[in-house]
């Protein structure tokens, strides 16, 4: 499991510590709290916050592979099981503000046409699904393992829709903090 993840990305050997979002609240400014703890569509929030800037989804990588060990655990996947992985940058005027990595067990994907999303936002599909359930958010200060940039906050949660379980991890980048004049934490 961990060996497979390492083959994908040498940095994955560093275990990522995820904590319930409420546990991080004392160290988080109210402005960041509104971004990190929100449970509605981040895509919609970014479009609103971006004002006149043009929103776009840049597809970094998509396909089948092994999840990181902490991702497999969050999804309740047995070691060695393959997953569908999608990595994107959510950009405003072409500048990445957030990078996201979504992971789903392959077995749960049947019939869901997620491959066809391309550079449309997963969020706009996901939040249109009736009966969507979102598990509690967790946060980390560790940088993303799939994109070479620091992040201010990272968060993750599992969405459930019928048989689909999808772990969405989103990292807020310094460019976003700078553009919106957000504090360092
Ligand atoms: C889950 C959402 O979807 C966003 C869009 C993503 C994509 O297109 O791959 C990935 C993660 C999210 O940041 C959302 O808008 O909240």
Image (cartoon, helix red, strand yellow):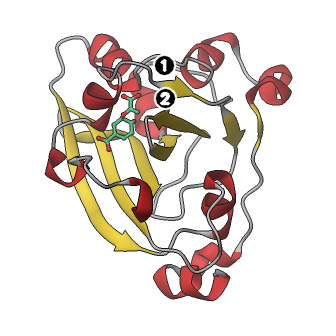
Could you say where residue 67 lies in the image, as x and y percent from the top left? 53, 68
SS at mark 1 in the image = loop
Q: Which residue is mark 2?
A: 177
Q: Which residue is mark 1?
A: 181
Q: Are marks 2 and 1 in contact (CB under 8 Å)?
A: yes
CA gap, disc 2 and disc 1 = 6 Å
In the depicted structure, whether residue 78 falls above or below residue 18: below
Could you say where residue 65 lies in the image, as x and y percent from the top left? 41, 75
Residue 86 appears in which quarter of the rendering?
bottom left
* Residue 152 shows in the view: yes
Quadrant location, ligand no. 1: top left
Could you say where residue 136 lies in the image, as x and y percent from the top left? 68, 29
SS at mark 2 in the image = helix
Could you say where residue 112 lies in the image, as x and y percent from the top left? 26, 46
What's the residue at 61%, 74% (across, down)? 12
Q: Judge from the rendering whether residue 119 lies leftward or rightward of residue 182; answer left or right.
A: left
> Crowding near pointer 1: few (<14 within 10 Å), some, many (20+)?
few
Q: Judge from the rendering whether residue 144 lies leftward or rightward of residue 91; answer left or right.
A: right
What's the residue at 64%, 76% (across, down)? 79
What's the residue at 59%, 69% (across, down)? 68
């Amino acid at each position: 499991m961990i060996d497979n993840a390492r083959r994908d990305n040498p940095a994955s050997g560093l275990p990522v510590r995820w904590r319930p979002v409420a546990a991080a609240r004392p160290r988080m400014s109210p402005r960041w709290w509104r971004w990190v703890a929100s449970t509605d569509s981040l895509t919609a929030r970014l479009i609103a916050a971006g004002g006149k800037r043009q929103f776009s989804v840049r597809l970094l990588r998509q396909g089948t592979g092994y999840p990181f060990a902490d991702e497999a655990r969050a999804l309740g996947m047995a070691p060695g099981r393959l997953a569908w992985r999608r990595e994107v940058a959510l950009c405003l005027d072409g500048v990445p503000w957030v990078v996201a990595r979504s992971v789903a067990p392959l077995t749960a994907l049947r019939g869901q046409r997620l491959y066809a999303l391309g550079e449309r936002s997963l969020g706009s599909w996901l939040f249109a699904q009736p009966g969507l359930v979102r598990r509690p958010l967790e946060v980390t200060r560790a940088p993303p393992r799939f994109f070479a940039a620091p992040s201010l906050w990272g968060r993750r949660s599992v969405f459930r829709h019928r048989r689909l379980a999808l772990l969405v991890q989103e990292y807020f980048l310094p460019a976003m903090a700078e553009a919106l004049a957000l504090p360092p934490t």
